[in-house]
Image: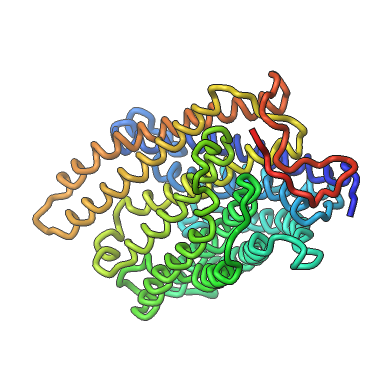
């Protein structure tokens, strides 16, 4: 199939809107995150700046919302609009409709930000916004998701199977999970303990059945393309896919400790989390050989560098979840800052690095531009990687110490607070470093779009010549 170049550019504006929104929301969220951590370290700021909408109770859910729906989800949708027609060979149609849906997603994020700032979060896990924002997200995704389903077309034997399977699961998970959570949690159909269970299930859907499969789409497609090596055993990949989809919705149950959640559900969550870690090992068995002996390539290709870090973060994130699911550890760390460590590993290290690598690899294919050899590339990688590594490790160690102290009746609360202060200081420095990394990337991102300097890197890893099939994929060589 020889499609004209113009037919592949119909989604270009929509993807650009989503990526610009993603970069902008990440910068805003990073700044607010630093302010929130600073309030924990210096409680007197609440008295010096008695402004309700910048209080910690507003900023904490606001930053999570910005990072989840504004930065990661918007960015994933943006890069997928570039990637999918190139792995399926089927161009998008109705470019204006896709553009309108991309704008609608950004409007929904903006309204959600305004609601949380003005009224505070709703108190529902992973659903801190109103019903109107949910409707806007679903309406936007109805269009964007329908466009992405074109990547599932043609024969299943004609293209890479695992990325399509993970994409199919993700496209079904978001509307199913978000719509069901909206009905159960705000429709009054899940009273009492059922509401807690519904919140935990929706939290699992959001992270492990929506964002994780989308990140795996990028890893399973881009790593083989960048390294020039095929993925190994398809049967192992299918087994890991089945385990990921079948068990991902149960992981939230492992977060529950005693309380109104039935013990059998807690046990199911623990078993599912540990088994899912085995599925992660299976995916790693397929993906890790692609990077063996590619150290020099990682140094030369910034996209491959970020994707490699994302892959290792994938292992660490689910190993950490399996560790926290162990009985005894789970009870001891329930009301501690280990939740922030988990969020840092998943959102910032796993999803964030996969998104950054995909933008570096795919944006040139959409905008016919290249990346320069600029110090901002190095600043982005090292400040982001080291910053989030320090944040996650400090939150993890502090959470374990905090849990041990909380379970010791002889330790007063003032002493527990003193345990956290040095760790929070390092966390603050790590968050500032990550923010600097995002500032460096945003500078490079917008300057590249405006073509303010000459690019010296290859134009794209997915070239789209006018006289060649768009389904021909050639890895980049530096």
Residue located 32% across and 46% down the image: 395
Along the viewing direction, whichever of 418 and 50 lies nearer the viewer: 418
Residue located 45% across and 63% down the image: 281
* Coordinates of residue 251 in the picture (x, y in percent): 44, 67
Query: Could you tell me which quadrant the N terminus lies in?
Result: bottom right
Along the viewing direction, whichever of 379 and 424 lies nearer the viewer: 379
Image quadrant where residue 278 sits: bottom left
Residue located 35% across and 39% down the image: 390
Q: Is residue 339 toward the left or the right of residue 103 in the image? A: left
* Coordinates of residue 322 in the picture (x, y in percent): 36, 64
Q: Is residue 317 toward the left or the right of residue 100 in the image? A: left
Residue located 46% across and 57% down the image: 123
Along the viewing direction, whichever of 52 and 248 lies nearer the viewer: 248
Q: Is residue 157 toward the left or the right of residue 76 in the image? A: right
Along the viewing direction, whichever of 258 and 193 lies nearer the viewer: 258
- In this picture, is 467 found above or below 163? above
Q: Is residue 187 visible?
A: no
- In this picture, is 403 found above or below 278? above
Name, please, the residue furthest toward the top: 453
Query: Could you tell me which quadrant the C terminus lies in?
Result: top right
* Coordinates of residue 438 in the picture (x, y in percent): 52, 32
* Coordinates of residue 100 in the picture (x, y in percent): 78, 46
């Amino acid at each position: 199939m020889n499609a004209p170049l113009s037919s592949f550019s119909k989604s270009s504006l929509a993807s650009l809107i989503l990526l610009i929104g993603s970069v902008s929301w990440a910068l805003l969220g990073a700044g607010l995150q630093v302010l929130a951590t600073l309030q924990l370290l210096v409680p007197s700021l609440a008295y010096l700046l008695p402004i309700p909408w910048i209080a910690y109770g507003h900023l904490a859910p606001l930053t999570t919302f910005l990072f989840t729906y504004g930065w990661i989800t918007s960015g994933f949708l943006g890069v997928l609009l570039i990637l999918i027609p190139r792995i399926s060979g089927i161009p998008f149609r109705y470019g204006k409709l896709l553009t309108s849906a991309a704008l609608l997603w950004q409007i929904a994020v903006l309204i959600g930000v305004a609601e949380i700032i003005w009224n505070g979060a709703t108190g529902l896990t992973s659903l801190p916004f109103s019903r109107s924002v949910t409707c806007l997200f679903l309406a936007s995704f109805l269009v964007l998701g329908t466009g992405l389903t074109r990547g599932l077309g043609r024969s299943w034997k004609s293209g890479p199977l695992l990325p399509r399977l993970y994409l199919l699961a993700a496209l079904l998970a978001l509307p199913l999970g978000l719509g069901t959570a909206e009905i159960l949690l705000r429709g009054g159909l899940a009273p009492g303990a059922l509401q807690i269970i519904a919140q935990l299930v929706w939290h699992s859907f959001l992270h492990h059945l929506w964002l994780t499969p989308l990140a795996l789409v990028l890893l399973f497609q881009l790593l083989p393309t960048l390294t020039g090596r095929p993925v190994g055993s398809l049967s192992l990949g299918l087994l890991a896919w089945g385990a990921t989809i079948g068990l991902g919705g149960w992981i939230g149950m492992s977060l529950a400790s005693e309380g109104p959640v039935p013990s059998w559900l807690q046990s199911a969550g623990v078993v599912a989390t540990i088994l899912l870690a085995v599925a992660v090992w299976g995916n790693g068995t397929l993906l890790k050989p692609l990077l063996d002996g590619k150290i020099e390539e990682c140094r030369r290709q910034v996209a491959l560098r970020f994707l490699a870090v994302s892959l290792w973060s994938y292992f660490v994130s689910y190993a950490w979840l399996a560790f926290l699911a162990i009985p005894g550890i789970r009870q001891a760390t329930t009301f501690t800052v280990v939740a922030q460590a988990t969020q840092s590993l998943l959102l910032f290290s796993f999803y964030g690095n996969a998104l950054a690598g995909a933008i570096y690899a795919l944006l040139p294919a959409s905008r016919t531009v290249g990346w320069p050899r600029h110090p901002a590339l190095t600043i982005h990688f090292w400040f982001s990687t080291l910053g989030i590594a320090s944040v996650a490790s400090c939150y993890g160690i502090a959470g374990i110490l905090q849990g041990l102290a909380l379970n010791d009746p002889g330790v007063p609360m003032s002493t527990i607070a003193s345990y956290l202060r040095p760790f929070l200081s390092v966390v603050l420095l790590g968050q500032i470093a990550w923010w600097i990394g995002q500032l460096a990337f945003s500078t490079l991102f917008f300057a590249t779009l405006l073509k303010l300097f000459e690019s010296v890197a290859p134009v794209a890893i997915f070239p789209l010549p006018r006289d060649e099939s768009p389904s021909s994929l050639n890895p980049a060589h530096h």
